[in-house]
């Protein structure tokens, strides 16, 4: 699969990079840590413009973030609270938890989106609570754009600097990505195990 992505990115140019980065946001097992260094490597060989490759990757990534934001916006706090009332244990949320999380995101959503877009695994998920909380579109796109440009630019820059050793970038980030996913999974399992249905009124 990685060989296919390498071939697509190298031969398809900017549209392929944008498409792969969109798919990376929709289907997280496709790693941006591989896609953007390939783009940077292609730029180092003169096959692509590095700034345009970064912009293409950022555009595709933002399109994926926008999709998840839309899903979160459709879900909304009221629907999520209703789901939490019926399936609280598996969501690990009570209606009161949803209310508190919404209030927290109203205060800190900008920073959460900005930095979340630069953290493996979290960068895909952060768009959902932004949509659920009703974060305004312009601030969401602004913070998402900044975080995404930093992330894609850094990865492409590493690939450009490393040249034919660009695959090392994915090797560096793979343990980090797996660690973040593992922590998120452990946190979820712990919340399921310790969830108390009666805490809604707390």
Image (spheres, rainbow, N blue to C red):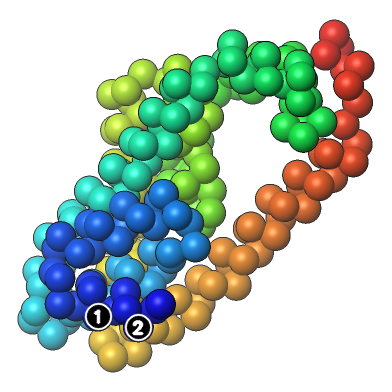
Residue 142 lies, with reference to residue 132, above or below; the image says below
Near-viewer residue (44 or 186): 186
Query: Looking at the image, which residue sits at the far bottom?
Result: 164
Identify the residue at horizontal 53%, vertical 54% (top origin): 121
Secondary structure under tag 2 reads helix
Picture quadrant where residue 199 is located: top right
Quadrant the C terminus occupies: top right
Q: Which residue is mark 1?
A: 7
Q: Is residue 62 visible?
A: yes
Left or right: residue 61 versus residue 201 is left
Secondary structure under tag 1 reads helix
Left or right: residue 128 versus residue 10 is right
Residue 156 lies, with reference to residue 161, above or below; the image says above
Identify the residue at horizontal 88%, vertical 21% (top origin): 197
Identify the residue at horizontal 34%, vertical 36% (top origin): 66
Near-viewer residue (163 or 36): 36
> Disc 2 versus disc 1: distance between alpha carbons?
6 Å
Instruction: Check contact, mark 2 vs mark 1: CB within 8 A.
Output: yes
Residue 3: which numbered mark, if any?
A: 2
| Residue 44: % across, % down | 16, 81
| Residue 97: % across, % down | 73, 20
Quadrant the N terminus occupies: bottom left
| Residue 160: % across, % down | 24, 78
Q: Is residue 98 visible?
A: no
Residue 27 lies, with reference to residue 171, above or below; the image says above
| Residue 145: % across, % down | 29, 41
Identify the residue at horizontal 45%, vertical 21% (top origin): 74
């Amino acid at each position: 699969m990685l060989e296919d992505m390498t071939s697509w990115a190298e031969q398809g140019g900017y549209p392929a990079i944008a498409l792969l980065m969109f798919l990376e946001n929709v289907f997280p097992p496709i790693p941006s840590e591989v896609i953007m260094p390939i783009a940077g490597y292609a730029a180092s060989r003169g096959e692509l413009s590095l700034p345009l490759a970064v912009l293409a990757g950022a555009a595709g990534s933002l399109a994926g973030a926008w999709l998840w934001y839309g899903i979160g916006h459709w879900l909304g706090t009221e629907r999520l609270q209703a789901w939490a009332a019926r399936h609280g244990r598996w969501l690990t949320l009570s209606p009161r938890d949803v209310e508190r999380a919404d209030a927290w995101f109203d205060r800190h959503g900008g920073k959460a989106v900005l930095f979340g877009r630069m953290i493996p695994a979290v960068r895909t998920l952060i768009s959902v609570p932004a949509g659920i909380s009703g974060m305004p579109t312009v601030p969401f796109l602004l913070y998402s754009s900044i975080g995404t440009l930093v992330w894609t630019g850094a990865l492409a820059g590493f690939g450009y600097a490393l040249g034919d050793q660009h695959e090392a970038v994915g090797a560096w980030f793979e343990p980090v990505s797996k660690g973040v996913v593992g922590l998120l999974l452990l946190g979820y399992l712990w919340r399921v195990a310790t969830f108390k249905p009666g805490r809604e009124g707390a």
